[in-house]
Image (tube, coloured by chain):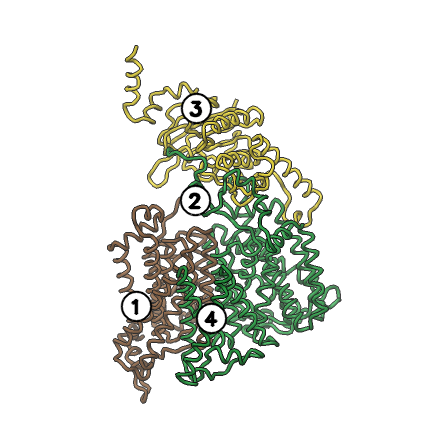
């Protein structure tokens, strides 16, 4: 290298916007800066970072244990049990993606292996009714072995190729269990599209879990143990090696870390965790079908891990709560359909409230309200069929919505165009700057409400999936470290 | 004892040469579609080293746009304009719409992440793919829309097939229909156009420069952002054409069609050597033909597994693909 | 006495380009050998070959008589060769101390299951890892101590990153340290410090050191022997004075004919 390099070369030019990384004085004052973040947010974040991991776990377990006492059976099932199930599943993905930095898109296939495995060993399908203490360890080891094989097959692969091989693997798994139902021991192995019904409840040494409450506490224990185990693993030689290979595989290899072996190990740990979660899932559902292990689940789990923050165990739990609660709110089976509207508008308001200063936030909200009434008046002036459609699941807010949002009846194609216009409006608004953006925001916000009332509310389950997709895109730009992860710096 | 291998041999014998040709024909037609999609993957990968998961869904949107144009112009039974301009307009609608969508996706989901960690644009791409597929689900309610190309231009009273479905010529007594000829020849024409574009034009030169070294290219006065946007546009245009072609050939569009087709097309790009344009074409044909033979001789449910097997095989034995160059790792 | 590290007839080409051509090199125990040469002479490739990142097309590389060719890089590191990178490849988002601790991987044993249940043996080992990491960091005086342990590596200044690279290589507990331009990008004071440090590494740390360096003051200050490369071929070897005055070396650096001109210039005043 002949060109002269200045000591502070990597950061000399970007003093303005970016952190002054690498400058000794700046580093030394890190603690002070931390103290400076005042207010409630600062207090919470300092309290969070200051408290030891044990305390966090105890607080979580204590809070989680109260759930069965104030939720009814159905709520506990969808909000409590499923959050823990997702959290456990995401914990395994966090090993592969968060710790080791491998983009494993075949992760749900391992979950499927676990579920189908349990369904084969403990159901009427083959008349085997193995006890869980025998079948679960066997299945977890078996799933880890499948992970080993897939890992070996892709051991030479870098990030992107690994992603495509694993994604294809997941697809092949679903296609296999769904379409081909090879006869094994006189019985179709996977049950084809019907899946395997009649799976036994978990039965440990003759003690059968039968109520939602029991499953909930069982999952709480399993999750806590897994979280503690992974916390220890992350703070060990293996965890450090994983982080090192995520940072720079070549340097890790040169520092005596067997990169390939550790990648495969991460794969196996992820697969084993997914397999374990799968067995519990099969028992809770008392049956398995291939459709349970599709891409939608994959994205949901990714959304959990990424929202919480890659590599953060507490983040996984947090992400699982947010994602599962929103999924359940938006599920068609929700007993309180008006809740999904509050969740949706609440989320929109929360995002819009990010506008600063406050006066501007208020201006946008008032403007949006006024804009709505004007549009509504014009629309109903043109023809009453632009505003006399049925408002779905409105509950107490029905009349307010009917007088503000245009809900046409009998205009076919309106839904499609409304949605496309919304997407276009959001794209355009995001590209504008300054006052133009504020001005564009008002009709866009109103149009969000129009599309929600006309399109999204009727298919709120699909809406949830669309929002997860948007969440992934938005998070990558706004906060790639998620909510609880640590911001990462890459110097290229 | 049940020996699957014997079954396969039996099937091969039963189908005979005519059957073998029929499968080859189907494979080549399908393979041309894959090749067009694969080109988009390979171009974007070549220039950004990004696996654009959303590409398959852009192809899906293209197929829906073609359907949209068809239904606006009267639908397959009573088209308001003549056949040839109708098909041209369908292609135009599908290609332009997909192209614009591709540019928007790039601008919105990938450009802000140009200097982010490697995993960030991949996850963003996953999000875009999921967003597009589920938006289509939302708007179509999961229905399958039928181009009804069998009827396209046909006689509704007699139920005679339209001109697209008439045999153009036949080999070994097996017909090759007009639409099959149309699909293969259109995709060959598009590939030739692309090859000329990349090798002969200023834009092509800028694209090659950018794919070698983005930073150096931008220092040489190339507006790399524009070049990348153009790459997305061209790749998405090809995917849109592939979508309309698939609609015309198979006749059905579905919100999930992009996912599997995208996977297979990416496999085609990998098999051909990622970043290589002729590689994507050859890979596409290879995948299409493999799939057709696997489906014909072994069983439809095995075609995906066979393609997956090819992917694994290439990954293990020749990760750089048929036409890819071995790269030297810089330390 | 056989040399600790021996290269015999090592060759490597990329495409048609011969980057290393039939190179012989020997490094004895507790010796400091510098490799010099103009850009593109193949110095970094030499390091990549020794550490197993590249495989030689021909020739042998031996550590204490044991052939290293074909071994994976992490195996070679474990056998006793650790390196730094000219381009600085730290684990940027890990803390300073973790960077060093990570390099202890090959010297420790606790597997994942023992780590999950935290067996007493694993905890003892973990304490040792901490202790050794602190020792290595203490080698650099106050530079990498105190609050810096828990700072992410990206927050370090350039010179400190170079130091951390060396500390990390030391933590792999090698017999031979390969230092790739340890003084690049440093100011004169820091360069002087690095020169002293390399000597201290040998004297107090007991390492054998093979170093690539451009700064001739550093080379002069530390080297027991100097090897000059040009186009992958060894053109001179010996003490610093011998190599620095070798006409072939001057030619390699300054171009054909430069050696005679310099000789003329030297002769003229006399």
Disc number placed over residue B184 in the picture, else none: 1
Nearest the viewer among B63 and A411 is A411
**Neighbour tally class for label 4: few under 14, some 14-19, many 20 plus, Cα within 10 Å:** many
* Residue at disc 1, secondary structure: helix
- Shade of chain C as shown in the rendered figure: yellow
| Residues indicated by labels 4 and 1 sit on the same polypeptide chain | no
Question: Which residue has dot 4 on it?
Answer: A368
Q: Colour of chain B?
A: brown
Residue pointed to by mark 3 = C217
Residues tagged 4 and 3 counted as in contact (Cβ below 8 A): no
Distance between the Cα atoms at labels 1 and 3? 69 Å
Q: What element carries label 3?
A: helix
Q: Where is residue A341 in the image (x, y as percent from the top left)?
A: 55, 73
Query: Residue C38 appears at what percent x and percent y?
Result: 36, 30
Q: Distance between the residues labelled 2 and 4?
A: 39 Å
Residue farthest bottom in this picture? B157
Please state the chain letter of the residue tagged with numbered disc 1 in the rendered image.
Answer: B
The image's mark for residue A14 is 2
Q: Distance between the residues labelled 4 and 3?
A: 71 Å
For the image, the number of numbered tags is: 4
């Amino acid at each position: 290298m002949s060109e002269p390099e200045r000591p502070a070369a990597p950061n000399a030019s970007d003093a303005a916007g970016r952190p002054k990384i690498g400058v000794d004085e700046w580093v030394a004052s890190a603690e002070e800066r931390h103290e400076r973040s005042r207010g409630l947010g600062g207090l919470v974040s300092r309290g969070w970072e200051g408290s030891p991991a044990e305390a966090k776990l105890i607080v979580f377990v204590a809070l989680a244990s109260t759930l069965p006492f104030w939720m009814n059976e159905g709520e506990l099932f969808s909000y409590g049990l499923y959050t823990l199930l997702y959290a456990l599943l995401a914990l395994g993905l966090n090993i592969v993606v968060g710790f080791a930095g491998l983009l494993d898109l075949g992760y749900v296939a391992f979950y499927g292996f676990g579920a189908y495995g349990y369904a084969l060993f403990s159901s009427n399908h083959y008349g085997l009714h193995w006890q869980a203490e025998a079948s679960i360890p066997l299945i977890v080891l078996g799933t880890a072995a499948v992970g080993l094989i897939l890992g070996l097959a892709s051991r030479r692969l870098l990030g992107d190729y690994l992603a495509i091989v694993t994604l294809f693997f997941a697809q092949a798994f679903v296609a296999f269990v769904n379409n081909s139902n090879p006869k094994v021991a006189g019985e179709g192995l996977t049950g084809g599209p019907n899946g395997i019904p009649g799976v036994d409840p978990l039965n440990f040494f003759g003690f059968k879990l039968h109520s939602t409450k029991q499953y909930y506490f069982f999952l709480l224990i399993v999750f806590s143990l897994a979280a503690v185990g992974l916390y220890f693993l992350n703070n060990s030689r293996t965890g450090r090696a994983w982080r090192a290979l995520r940072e720079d595989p070549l340097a890790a290899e040169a520092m005596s870390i067997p990169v390939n072996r550790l990648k495969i190990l991460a794969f196996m740990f992820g697969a084993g965790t997914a397999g374990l979660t799968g067995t519990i899932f099969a028992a809770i559902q008392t049956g398995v079908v291939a459709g349970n292990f599709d891409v939608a689940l994959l994205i949901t789990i990714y959304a959990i891990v990424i929202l919480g923050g890659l590599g953060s165990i507490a983040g996984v739990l947090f992400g699982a709560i947010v994602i599962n609660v929103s999924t359940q709110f938006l599920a068609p089976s929700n007993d309180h359909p008006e809740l999904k509207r509050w969740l949706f508008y609440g989320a929109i308001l929360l995002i819009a409230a990010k506008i600063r200063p406050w006066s501007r936030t208020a201006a946008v909200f008032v403007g949006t309200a006024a804009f709505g009434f004007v549009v509504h008046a014009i629309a109903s002036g043109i023809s009453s069929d632009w505003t006399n459609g049925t408002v779905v699941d409105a509950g107490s807010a029905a009349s307010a919505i009917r007088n503000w949002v245009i809900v046409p009846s009998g205009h076919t194609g309106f839904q499609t165009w409304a949605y496309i216009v919304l997407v276009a409006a959001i794209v355009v608004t995001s590209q504008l700057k300054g006052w133009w953006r504020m001005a564009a925001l008002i009709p866009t916000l109103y149009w969000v409400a129009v599309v929600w009332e006309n399109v999204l509310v009727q298919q709120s389950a699909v809406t949830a999936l669309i929002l997860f997709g948007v969440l992934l895109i938005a998070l990558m730009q706004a906060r790639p470290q998620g909510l609880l992860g640590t911001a990462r710096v890459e110097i290229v | 004892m049940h020996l699957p291998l014997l079954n396969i041999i039996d099937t091969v014998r039963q189908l005979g040469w005519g059957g073998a040709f029929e499968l080859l024909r189907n494979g080549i037609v399908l393979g041309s579609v894959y090749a067009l999609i694969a080109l988009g993957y390979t171009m974007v990968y070549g220039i950004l080293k990004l696996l654009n998961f959303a590409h398959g869904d852009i192809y899906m949107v293209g197929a829906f746009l073609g359907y949209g144009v068809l239904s606006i112009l009267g639908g397959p039974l009573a088209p308001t304009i003549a056949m040839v301009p109708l098909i041209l307009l369908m292609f135009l609608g599908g290609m332009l719409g997909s192209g614009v969508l591709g540019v928007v996706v790039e601008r919105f989901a990938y450009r802000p992440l140009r200097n982010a960690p490697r995993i960030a644009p991949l996850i963003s791409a996953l999000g875009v793919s999921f967003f597009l597929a589920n938006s289509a689900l939302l708007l179509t309610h999961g229905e399958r829309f039928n181009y009804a190309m069998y009827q396209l231009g046909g006689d509704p009273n007699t139920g005679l097939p339209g001109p697209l479905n008439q045999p153009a010529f036949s080999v070994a007594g097996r017909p090759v229909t007009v639409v099959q000829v149309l699909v293969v020849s259109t995709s060959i024409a598009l590939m030739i156009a692309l090859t000329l574009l990349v090798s002969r034009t200023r834009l092509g030169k800028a694209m090659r420069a950018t794919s070698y070294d983005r930073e150096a290219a931008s220092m040489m006065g190339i507006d790399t952002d524009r070049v990348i946007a153009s790459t997305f546009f061209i790749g998405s245009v090809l995917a849109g054409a592939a979508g309309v072609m698939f609609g015309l050939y198979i006749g059905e569009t579905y919100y999930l069609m992009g996912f599997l087709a995208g996977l297979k097309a990416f496999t085609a790009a990998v098999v051909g050597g990622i970043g290589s344009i002729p590689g994507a074409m050859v890979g596409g044909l290879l995948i299409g033909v493999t799939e057709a033979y696997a489906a014909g001789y072994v069983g439809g449910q095995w075609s995906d597994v066979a393609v997956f097997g090819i992917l694994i095989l290439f990954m293990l034995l020749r990760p750089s693909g048929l036409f890819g160059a071995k790269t030297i790792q810089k330390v | 006495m056989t040399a600790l590290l021996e290269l015999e007839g090592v060759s490597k080409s990329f495409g048609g380009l011969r980057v290393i051509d039939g190179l012989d090199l020997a490094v004895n125990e507790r010796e400091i050998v510098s490799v010099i040469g103009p850009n593109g002479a193949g110095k970094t490739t030499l390091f990549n070959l020794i550490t197993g990142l590249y495989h030689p097309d021909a020739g042998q590389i031996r550590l204490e008589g044991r052939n290293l060719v074909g071994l994976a890089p992490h195996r070679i590191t474990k056998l006793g060769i650790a390196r730094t990178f000219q381009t600085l490849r730290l684990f940027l988002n890990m803390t300073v101390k973790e960077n060093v601790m990570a390099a202890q991987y090959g010297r420790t044993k606790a597997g994942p299951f023992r780590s999950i249940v935290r067996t007493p043996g694993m905890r003892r080992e973990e304490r040792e890892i901490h202790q050794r990491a602190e020792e290595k960091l203490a080698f650099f005086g106050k530079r990498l101590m105190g609050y810096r342990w828990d700072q992410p590596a990206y927050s370090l200044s350039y010179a400190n990153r170079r130091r951390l690279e060396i500390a990390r290589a030391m933590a792999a507990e090698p017999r031979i340290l390969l230092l790739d331009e340890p003084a690049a990008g440093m100011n004169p004071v820091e360069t002087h410090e690095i020169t002293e440090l390399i000597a201290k590494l040998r004297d107090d740390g007991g390492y054998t050191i093979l170093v690539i360096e451009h700064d001739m003051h550093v080379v002069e200050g530390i080297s027991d022997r100097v090897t000059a490369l040009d186009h992958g071929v060894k053109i001179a070897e010996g003490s610093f004075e011998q190599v620095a005055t070798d006409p072939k070396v001057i030619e390699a650096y300054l171009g054909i004919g430069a050696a005679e001109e310099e000789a003329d210039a030297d002769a003229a005043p006399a």
